[in-house]
Image (cartoon, rainbow, N blue to C red):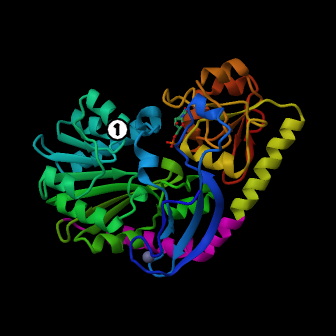
């Protein structure tokens, strides 16, 4: 299938000088987990090109092929509140920002892409006024049912009007900016909503971490941009916003940064930190690095498939652990289907009973892992490795092993540690 559109110029700076760095071929939409009746329909699910380009003008690494947003976001199966690691991260986030801005009860915190309201609940516990903006209907309804006021819409000029210009003391957007097609329009709306002494805090996986750990499975159609902070800082600057601080979280999604921005000259700027990050991006996210990444991605595919096929030949029972969107990309790109994995476990009730798109592997309750006692579990939710290994001590003790896909396929078990 062809995408809804293919953009001809860079999403942020408008340059037409986009250079192809990696082609993952045609892949299904990562979050479109199939209901059972769809999984037996012989008509294949739609697949779209997944090609990664480098902007030779501003350095932003990005997709050009755009899939219709309604197809991706109307009904969304990702929940923030499914991992303890995320709950702790967001609670500390709320604590840090509440202190930094000395937030009071009348101060408004707006969370863009508020999902199930996890972050806003953490702010509400600290007494501030909160408002979520969430386009997925199922998630907005869930958050509202749990008492988190939520606008069911895409953040944009209408939202600014509803909130009132410069009405938000804090705007947060976590793992959202990477999904935005019209980045200039988005930042303009952020700038117009942000109070004159407010902060815009956003988290994105850092492109340097993605490339150095070869995490190609976080490349999917929803993630239109793979950010470095140099291109982001240029973008903010065009909309009366300035990057003031950066904080690295190496364990969140394989390596994320929280960027803080504000209207110019309202907060001190942590220039040393920002300069260091820009410097790392010069050598860690240039075209040559993207090229090397492409080479390693092909290599990981070959080695992972060989490892799994070898274990199958030896009669081993293998399942998948976790059904994040990433799993759809990893499994389809590496052609790991039901002949290799009996099932994939996931804690999210919304995903259980559905199937991974493309490879059509069933997603089941994690209890099935304990019942089936597989020899190996391919760790698809690798970003929660520590949390999962801690939780699965029993599986490990009984001889079960994990296959970790990155930075290179490896086996982890009680005897292999
Ligand atoms: P994410 O990597 O996109 O945040 O999604 C993680 C997925 O992994 C989510 O669907 C929940 C699932 N998961 C488990 O099944 N078991 C676990 O122990 C954890 C931490 C996550
Ligand atoms: Zn550009």
Residue 285 in sight:
no
| Count of marks overlaid on the render | 1
Query: Does the magenta-highlighted stretch encompass residue 268?
Result: yes
Q: Nearer the viewer, residue 391 or 46?
A: 46
Residue 410 in sight:
yes
Residue drawn at (41%, 48%) of the image: 70
Q: Residues within 10 Å of mark 1 (few under 14, many from 20)?
A: some
Magenta span: 267-295
Q: Residue furthest right?
A: 314
> Percent x, y for residue 221?
52, 55
Quadrant in which ligand 2 is drawn: bottom left
> Percent x, y for residue 68?
45, 54
> Percent x, y for residue 376?
75, 33
Compared with 265, 352 (above or below) is above
Q: Does ligand 1 reach within 8 Å of label 1's beta carbon?
A: no
Residue drawn at (41%, 70%) of the image: 11
Q: Nearer the viewer, residue 388 or 65?
A: 65
Query: Does the magenta-highlighted stretch encompass residue 379?
Result: no
Compared with 156, 275 (above or below) is below
> Percent x, y for residue 305?
78, 48
Q: Residue furthest top?
A: 371
Compared with 378, 228 (above or below) is below
Say left or right for 332 vs 201: right
Query: Element at badge 1?
Result: helix
> Hey, which quadrant is residue 80 in on the image?
top left
Image quadrant in which the C terminus is located? top right
Image quadrant in which the N terminus is located? bottom right
Which SS does the magenta portion mostly show? Answer: helix
Say left or right for 211 vs 298: left
Q: Nearer the viewer, residue 135 or 203?
A: 135
Q: Which residue is mark 1?
A: 137
């Amino acid at each position: 299938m062809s995408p809804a559109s293919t953009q001809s110029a860079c999403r942020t700076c408008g340059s037409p000088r986009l250079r192809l760095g990696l082609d993952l071929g045609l892949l299904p939409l990562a979050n479109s987990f199939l209901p059972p009746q769809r999984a037996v329909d012989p008509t294949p699910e739609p697949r779209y090109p997944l090609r990664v380009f480098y902007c030779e003008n501003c350095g932003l690494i990005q997709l050009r092929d755009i899939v219709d947003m309604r197809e991706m976001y109307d009904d969304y199966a990702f929940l923030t509140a499914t991992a303890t690691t995320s709950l702790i991260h967001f609670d500390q986030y709320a604590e840090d920002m509440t202190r930094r801005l000395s937030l009071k009860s009348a101060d408004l915190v707006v969370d863009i892409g508020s999902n199930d309201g996890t972050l806003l609940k953490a702010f509400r516990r600290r007494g501030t006024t909160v408002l979520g903006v969430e386009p997925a209907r199922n998630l907005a309804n869930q958050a509202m049912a749990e008492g988190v006021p939520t606008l069911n819409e895409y953040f944009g000029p209408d939202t600014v009007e509803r909130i009132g210009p410069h009405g938000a003391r804090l705007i947060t957007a976590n793992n959202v900016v990477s999904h935005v097609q019209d980045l200039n329009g988005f930042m303009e709306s952020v700038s117009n909503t942000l109070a004159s002494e407010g902060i815009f805090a956003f988290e994105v996986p850092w492109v340097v971490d993605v490339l150095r750990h070869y995490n190609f499975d976080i490349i999917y159609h929803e993630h239109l941009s793979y950010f470095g902070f140099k291109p982001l800082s240029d973008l903010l600057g065009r909309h009366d916003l300035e990057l003031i601080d950066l904080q690295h979280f190496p364990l969140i999604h394989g390596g994320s940064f929280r960027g803080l921005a504000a209207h110019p000259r309202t907060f001190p700027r942590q220039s040393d930190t920002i300069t260091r990050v820009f410097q790392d991006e010069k050598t860690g996210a240039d075209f040559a690095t993207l090229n090397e990444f492409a080479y390693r991605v092909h290599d990981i595919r070959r080695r992972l498939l060989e490892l799994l096929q070898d274990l199958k030949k030896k009669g081993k029972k293998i399942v998948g652990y976790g059904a994040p969107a990433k799993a759809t990309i990893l499994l389809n790109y590496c052609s790991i289907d039901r002949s290799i994995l009996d099932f994939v476990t996931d804690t999210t009730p919304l995903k259980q009973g559905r199937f991974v798109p493309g490879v059509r592997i069933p997603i089941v309750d994690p209890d099935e892992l304990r019942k089936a006692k597989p020899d190996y579990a391919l760790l698809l939710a690798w970003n929660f490795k520590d949390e999962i290994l801690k939780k699965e001590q029993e599986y490990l003790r009984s001889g079960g092993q994990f296959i970790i896909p990155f930075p290179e396929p490896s086996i982890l078990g009680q005897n292999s540690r």
